[in-house]
Amino acid sequence: MLPATDTTIADPETRETEDHWVARVRQGDTVAFEKLYRRHGGRVFALCLRMSSNRAVAEELTQETFIRAWQQIGKFRGDSRFGTWLYRIAANLTLSQLRSRKPESGCDWIDELAGETALVGHSDHQRDLERGMTRLPDGARSVLVLHDIAGFAHKEIGDMLGVATGTCKAQLHRARKLMREYLES
């Protein structure tokens, strides 16, 4: 259930196409926005799901991410790929939601996912990884997801979380240590 590799890095033609869609969205083209949604929706959802550990919340956050992207497309300068900008919106929304929520008694999405056809043949090891991630404290899980899954640099994560780069590195080290302990037990 890891997000698919973003082909816009390796394929300049795909990036040009995406840049074209972004330009059309800036002009109010909803068809171009739908294409961007289809390209990035699954990965945005996966990021929100892994960070929030709640399927319903992840669905809401995914919708809110795309609403914000539509509203703020004029602020996208093109310094990074559109997907990177979009994932930052998703991560910031999820982090904001995590800060405001009350602690939940469990994780509903692993058991839901286990019954879906997407997990037919899903390894026990992968499920252990997913369960281990839900046991991590919010800060450690956020940094682990943003760095190891979404591919953000420590500085970018620090900017998103409002903490120093060193704090991000320490959180990632802690998250990895806790994951190792969980998987070895």
Image (spheres, helix red, strand yellow):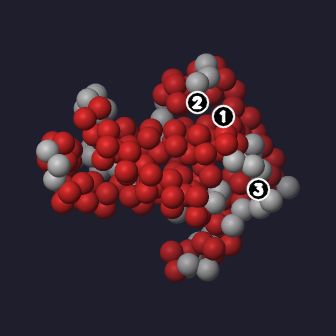
Q: Position of residue 33 (x, y in %)?
A: 24, 54
- Dots 3, 2 in contact, CB < 8 A: no
* Disc sitting over residue 104 in the figure: 3
Q: Please report whichever mark, 3 or 2, sits nearer to the chain's N-terminal start.
A: 3
Indicate the amino acid at tag 1: Leu
Quadrant position of the C terminus in the picture: bottom right
Q: Position of residue 43 (x, y in %)?
A: 43, 55
Residue 149: image location, x then y, percent: 52, 46
Q: Is residue 46 visible?
A: no
- Say which of 64 and 116 sits in front: 64
Count of picture labels:
3
| Relative side of 4 to 58, left or right | left
- What numbered label is drawn on residue 1? none
Q: Secondary structure at mark 1?
A: helix
Q: Name the one closer to the observer, 151 or 92.
A: 92
Q: Which mark is residue 172?
A: 1
Residue drawn at the location 31% of the way across and 57% of the way down: 37
Three-letter amino acid code at the position of disc 2: Leu
Residue drawn at x 61%, y 37% is 143
Pointer 3 local density, CA inside 10 Å: few below 14, some 14–19, many at least 20:
few
